[in-house]
Image (cartoon, grey):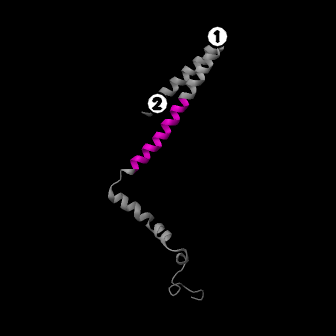
Amino acid sequence: MLIFILLLVVALVALSLHLMEQAITRQQLSLMLAGAMVASASAALMGVYFMTGNYMGYVNQLNKTPAEMEEAYESIRWYVEAQAQPESQAYISDSSSAPTIGD
């Protein structure tokens, strides 16, 4: 699919350059504007391709099995639990198990 889109963009750019060359030789502003519109359409096509490619990658990540989702949840569980604690208790540690400087 990427090769097809790249070939289409190359063809659009070639058409754009051809229209602009014809605009210069014939001294017609309308051909120059048409060439600029075709060039902007090819740039927009590449932009849409990259945006949809990123979105499709995101959607493919959503098709995970429950085991994979559980693994992902476990990897961030500690962060979620730390955010759920009140701020006054977030930094309190058990001082009886903490090593002292003299040990």
Q: Secondary structure at mark 1?
A: helix
Foreground: disc 2 or disc 1: 1
With respect to residue 40, does 53 lie above or below? below
Mark sitting on residue 6? none
Dot 1 amino acid type = Arg
Residue drawn where x is 40% and y is 65% of the image: 74
Residue 34 belongs to the span the image colors magenta: no
- Residue contact at pointers 2 and 1, CB within 8 angstroms: no
Residue drawn where x is 55% and y is 74% of the image: 87
Q: Is residue 56 left or right of residue 38?
A: left
Q: Quarter holding the N terminus?
A: top left
Residue with the most extreme front position:
86
Residue with the most extreme left position:
66
Residue drawn where x is 48% and y is 27% of the image: 7
| Location of residue 54 in the rendering, given as x and y in whole percent from the top left corner | 47, 43
| Location of residue 94 in the rendering, given as x and y in whole percent from the top left corner | 51, 83
Residue 46 belongs to the span the image colors magenta: yes
Residue at mark 2: 5
Whichever of labels 2 and 1 marks the residue nearer the N terminus, that label is 2
Closest to the observer: 31 or 54?
31
The residue stretch that appears in magenta: 42-61
